[in-house]
Amino acid sequence: MSSFWSRRQFINVSAQTAVLAAGTRFLVLDGSAEESTSRYQALFAPLDQFVEQYMREQGAPGMTLVLADRDGVQRVVTYGFSDVDRKISVTPDQLFQIGSISKSFAAHCALQLHEEGKLDFHKPVLEYLPWFRMETKFAPITTHHLLTHTTGLPGDPPVFLSDPNAKHQTAYPPGNQFHYNNMCFVLLGHLLVTLDGRPLSEIFRKRVFEPLGMTKSEPVITLDVRARTARSYNAFQNDRPYPMCGRLAEAPYVVITDASGCIASTPEDMGRYIQMIASHGKGPKGALLNEQSFALFSHPHIKAEEFGPTASYGYGIAVDTLEGHRVLRHTGGMVSFASALQVDIDAGVGAFASINAMQGYRPNPVAQYAIELMRAQRESKPHPAAPAPRDIYKVEHAAAYAGTFQGSKGGKLEFVAEGDKLFLVHEGKRVALEGSNDAFLVLHPDFDRFPLLFGRADAKDGKSPVVEASWGSEWFTNAKYSGPKTFDYPKEWDTFAGHYRNESPWIGSFHVLVRKGKLFIDGVIPLEPAAGDIYRLSDEESNTEWIRFTEIVNGHAMKIKFSGEDMWRVAAL
């Protein structure tokens, strides 16, 4: 799984033996004094059972978890290992990087500045930060747009581009479309520093940590706190889709000091943060936000389907409903940590879970099941059943994919179905497929570079016959296919095809290829020509990212600009 794919959470499928293999001791370590008197004690055992099931299914090395409500922290518990090789357990005092959940902390600071009359959410950002290099033909971008991911700016590049003459470009008018945007929260951090007058680390400490008693949290991730941080893991090969339970390697430590994801915390401290949100902005020393500010924080300003079909986005937080209750939630994906925060602000309960590995998923099922259990306990209702174990090899309507597909460049693919299982016949052996919705991984070294995608006779009808398959640039059809088999395209695109990489873990690696007369990234995301020599990522209407190919040498583009950031061809010279 490349960093590129982890951001888009493409498909998560599993294989092989989990890190916590069957038969190993599952470590559970309770870490708070409140647990013996907690009103939720009866739910601890079913929750632990589900966490064990979930971690084994996902291949997670370790997890930290906190339950809290309006009255305070109710349980701190850790599971599994911080150091897998030496079998050292995760402990409650270890720091976990919370990733993009940090955005909600930045939003709280911005709302406090708004209360103080220092920040107008609807004033153009360039009036506060005139140094920001940006061009737009649309209306000005405001702080409201930064907080809601609706600027129309690219989300992946740094605020300060490597080319001193380059400027960020907007793709569409601000305020109309949601596109998740890390860069804009980096920019928001600069805005906080400008208006508050203190470093970002001090702003977080004084405005959020100290009022809530978050004494063990760190506002920025530097090497100074590495010794307190849980050992963490990521994909052994990060240039291809990652299967759940795939091979992991200890991750390099990264330094993150910007507002898009710079906080590291302990479960107990995150419980204090949950208590404040569950109390609608009220902390133990008084209100962190007044009623009007909390209403802005938790208001569904814009639909945000990246967070789910019913989700919207507030200020630095997703806004959703769960069984009729209002839920504020966010996930955090770091190079080697994955986190989930969910707070039911109607029932006043919440949970935070974090895993010390980045495998493409977030532990939302754990946080959600925890708040469902807590709400049932408060209402004296039976505990809801845990989500059922997942059969990773189960394929709905597997027989629809069976048959032989002939390749446009020669060769063929043969698939067979047995009940709800689907197999590729390769070198005389059957290889199980994992995935769903016409997208699968083939867990064989000959096929692990790209996902395997199936196409239907009617692309808009998921029940129409399967007529084609693709893997990277390779395209295959079966006897039911009736469309064209040759396609024209600009021949300069052949110079673009190749593997490009940036060693920044936030940019990572991807392949550009041509298939059926179209340009793709990793065979999945279409690239569409735009103005001049720009190609836009067109998997979603709201996608603001773009690519420019440069430095053509011996018939190959040696370099690309990805939304302004440099990537280089991986080539054997």
Image (spheres, grey):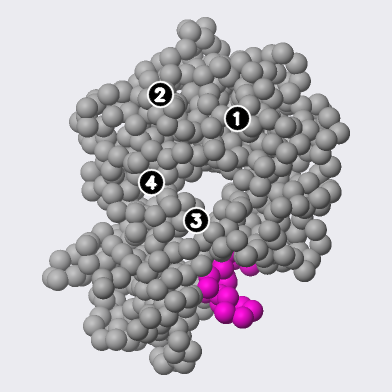
In the image, the segment drawn in magenta is 527-548
Q: What element carries label 4?
A: loop
Q: Where is residue 414 in the image (x, y as percent from the top left)?
A: 25, 75
Residue 318 located left or right of residue 118:
left
Q: Is mark 1 on a helix, strand or loop?
A: helix
The residue carrying mark 4 is 359
Instruction: Give how far apart the Cα atoms at labels 1 and 2 are.
Output: 18 Å
Instruction: Give how far apart the Cα atoms at labels 1 and 3 are.
Output: 29 Å
| Amino acid on which the number 2 mark rests in the picture | Arg
| Amino acid on which the number 1 mark rests in the picture | Ser
Instruction: Give how far apart the Cα atoms at labels 4 and 3 are.
Output: 12 Å
Above or below: residue 378 compared with residue 539: above
Crowding near the residue tagged with mark 3, few <14, some 14–19, many ≥20 C-alpha atoms within 10 Å? few
Q: Position of residue 360 (x, y in %)?
A: 42, 49
Q: Point out the tag, 1 or 2, that comes first from the N-terminus.
A: 1
Residue drawn 38% across the image and 38% down it: 253
Q: Point out the tag, 1 or 3, that comes first from the N-terminus.
A: 3
Q: Do the residues labelled 1 and 3 touch (CB within 8 Å)?
A: no
| Amino acid on which the number 4 mark rests in the picture | Gln
Above or below: residue 166 compared with residue 551: above
Q: Is residue 330 visible?
A: no
Residue 490 in magenta stretch: no
Crowding near the residue tagged with mark 1, few <14, some 14–19, many ≥20 C-alpha atoms within 10 Å? some
The residue carrying mark 1 is 201
Q: Point out the tag, 2 or 4, that comes first from the N-terminus.
A: 2
